[in-house]
Image (tube, rainbow, N blue to C red):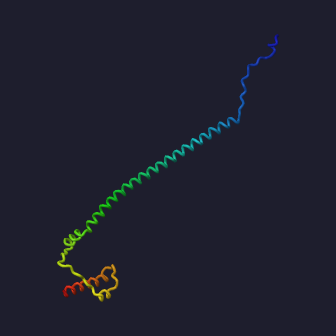
Amino acid sequence: MTVAAAVPLRAPSAPELRLVPARRAMGVRLVGITTLLACAAIVVLAALAIFHTMLATGQYHLSELNAEIAVERERLIDLRYELQTLQGPSEIELMGIGALGLVTASDPVDVRIEPRHIASVDSPTDQAGGDWLSIKTLLTDASTAHDRRS
């Protein structure tokens, strides 16, 4: 018997695996933090996209309103021009002769109202009828009195 035979032979042993808890926990934390940051970045980007869409919609509405304002300003200019032409002396004369049946005066007539007529009427009001009828009567009396004197 030889010495080598007496010693049992062992297969070479595999290296021993030991778990290192600190490194494993660090890896899990790193993956968790990365996932959390990625989710936060996606939420922020989605919020920015929604905010940009809202701003673009508001700007579109604003440009539509500006276009409407420009159209209405042009219409206002046209209406002011039309108002000026309708208030012109020639238009008023045509309206008076045609629609109201007025005739041009042969001579200008001065209307004189006597102070006693003015004193007899209180301040005129815009109510229907009221004091305007008395003023009309006074003016008619004054104009007929002036015609009778001349």
Q: Residue furthest bottom?
A: 116
Residue 82 at x, y percent in the picture: 27, 64
Quarter of the image with the N terminus is: top right
Residue 88 in the image: above or below residue 48: below
Above or below, comparing residue 132 to residue 55 in the picture: below
Name the residue: 49% across, 49% down.
Answer: 51
Q: Does residue 144 appear left or right of residue 16 in this picture? A: left
Q: Position of residue 47 (x, y in %)?
A: 52, 47
Q: Position of residue 81 (x, y in %)?
A: 28, 63
| Residue drawn where x is 55% and y is 43% of the image | 41
Q: From this view, report whether residue 142 is shown above or below residue 81.
A: below
At 20% from the left edge and 88% from the top edge, which residue is drawn?
A: 149
- Vertical relation: 116 (above or below) 30: below
Q: Say which of 109 and 52 sits in front.
A: 109
Q: How many marks?
A: 0
The residue furthest left is 106
116 or 129: which is nearer to us?
Answer: 116
Residue in the picture at 54% in, 46% down: 44
For the C terminus, the image quarter is bottom left
Place residue 26 in its image quadrant. Answer: top right
